[in-house]
Amino acid sequence: MNTHLLRLSLGYFVLSMLWVLLGDVLLEHLTADSSRAWDIGKGAFFVAVTSILLYLISRRLFLRLAEQQNTQSQQEASLRQAAAVFATTQEGVLVTDPQQHIVHVNPAFSRITGYSAEEVLGQTPRLFASGKHDAAFYQRMWQALGSEGAWSGEIWNRRKSGEIYPVWQNLRSIHDDKGQLSHYVAVFSDLSALKRSREEVDLLAHYDPLVNLPNRLLFTERAKQALERARSQRHSGALLLIDLDHFKDINESLGHSLGDALLQAVTARLNEYLKDDMTLGRLGGDEFALLCEGHGAEKATALALCILDRLNEPFQIDGQQLFSSASIGIVLYPYPNDIQNVEQLMRNADSALFKAKNSGRSTYAFYSEELTSQARQRVELATALRQALEQGQLRLHYQPIYDLRRGEIAGFEALVRWQHPEKGLISPAAFIPIAEESGLISAIDRWVLAQACNQARDWLAQGRSLGFVAVNISSRLFGLGELDLQVATTLADCGLDARHLELEITESAVMQDPDAALELLQRLRALGVRLAIDDFGTGYSSLQRLKRMNVHKLKIDQGFVRGLPEDREDAAITRSVISLAHNLGLQVVAEGIEAVDQAAFLLAHDCDFGQGYGFARPQPAAEIDWQAAELDYGQNCHATRS
């Protein structure tokens, strides 16, 4: 019943009755006119009063009706908005009655769970239980819901397909106007995609994507844990640092895709030796690490030999047969080397690996304190080398290159030496690798180029019969791509004719970027300088590329000359290179000639030039003997026949 309307009606009734009952008495006291006039006045007054009352009553009623309609419109709009949110939200919504029977779900619920609304209405949420949570978990959830009216947390549910998946769920209890529990509402988000993304990010952060092995970050963490276990349990372990030999040449000459396939094949072979107490990781590039808990020196040695033998076997990749050996550095921990932390462990393994590579590769080496001292010396040497370049401590020595037919000097190869103020003359074998590692090799190359051109100019000015001065160009300087500009500037500054300069470039330098290298070689040849491929036969260049290189000479590596003439394979390779070069219109230089029979063999097979200790050692410019070769290998007879 509308109480406001009832009060207004009763008020109007009371006022009207009072007027009817008391109106005559009141008017009699106010006027003395006739009864007719009183009746008219009384009626008019009654009409006026009732009209005002009716207006006020109606106005109040209409205002209340307008308020109610406005409130109802707002409520309907809110309901429509809520219904739209309910239907379109990406979060699942489930509503139950106080007895936990499902009374409503939204479309997102069906999309996430796989259940339609018809399949779950009247059911309880136990239908979605995954079995991953115990009774205590649900007890804590209901306690929070009862005491606080809400609960939030991660929970695992089961889809209709049977898949178990994680959700973030918000539960809330709903009460009516009287405070009585009317419903439970659950709003949840599917965390499956988020967890998968986190797992993928974790995988990328800790595993190498190419070979699916722990990367340096994860491997270092596992090595740290293994070191702590070894120290606490007082047992030994071994770390094997494995580096592929000459992988860079394969990668650059045959392509990165083939290089990646080789790394995957190497990983598969290394996995053959993996056991429960081992961790295999890829630290980067072609470097792998194998952590072996419970391994002493004997077991580590046996394992290293097995790995070396296995990696020496040929690989069949994309229809090609590849050979790739490896070098292994081994460090034992925590004793006898008293390894304090994982950083020291990795440094010692690097030192052992460096020793293995310097021992000829395809072998293994154990770490020792001596290696640490050598590593420290390398760091000190790199600093001293930078100072040597700035303070003018470098020197050039020149090794004669002889015309084998005439036995006379045709040119020289410029070789850098380091005259240390305290240590004396330092061998290039000691500082050139450090120069390459530190990046100083390019600056040294430029210095050598300028000094050699100046010396060649001076010799020619003295009237010496000089054909050329050969300068070695490092892969780093060649790879910069501006070597032609550097050479042109140097020749102009020195005033040397380009035909007297010969640049020796290794196969590996050319194969880093063959197309760019061929363009650079064309530009260099256009300057008028002579070009030679150094250490030919030790790289991976193809005959097709050799034909396109447009160089003047091939230099046979001393590794093939050393076995002449007894070694059949060296002899066969040498003959083949000489024949190949001549058929392509190229001249041939043989390096490392130390004996008469070597020079005689090369002369007999029409090798054009030769150099080596058998003829002359590298000397400062002022000490060079310009006389004909003292080595008698039959050149006079050959010259007579010619």
Image (cartoon, grey):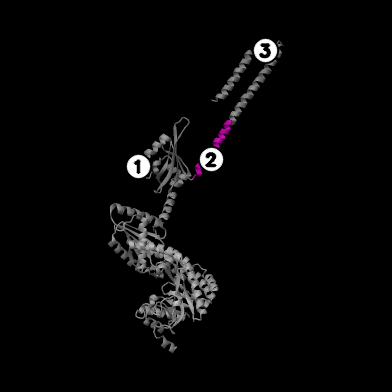
Depth-wise, is mark 3 or mark 1 nearer the camera? Answer: 1
Q: Residue at x 51, y 79 (%)?
A: 460
User: Does 505 sit above or below residue 60?
Assistant: below
Residue occupying the far bottom of the picture: 641
The residue carrying mark 3 is 27
Quarter location, residue 115: top left
State whether residue 346 appears in this view: yes
Question: In the visual, does 145 lie left or right of 487?
Answer: left
Location of mark 1 (residue): 134
Q: Nearer the viewer, residue 271 or 452?
A: 452
Of badges 3 and 2, nearer the viewer stands 2
Q: Is residue 69 magenta?
A: yes
Residue labelled with disc 2:
81
Q: Amino acid at mark 1?
A: Asp
Q: Nearer the viewer, residue 405 or 288?
A: 405
Predominant secondary structure, magenta span: helix
Q: Amino acid at mark 3?
A: Leu
Image: magenta residue range: 67-89
* Badge 3 element: helix
Q: Name the residue rendered at 35%, 40% in the picture.
A: 136
Q: Mark 1 or mark 2, which has the lower sequence index?
A: 2
Judge whether residue 82 is colored magenta. Answer: yes
Which badge, 3 or 1, comes first in the chain's sequence? 3
> What's under tag 2, amino acid-wise?
Gln
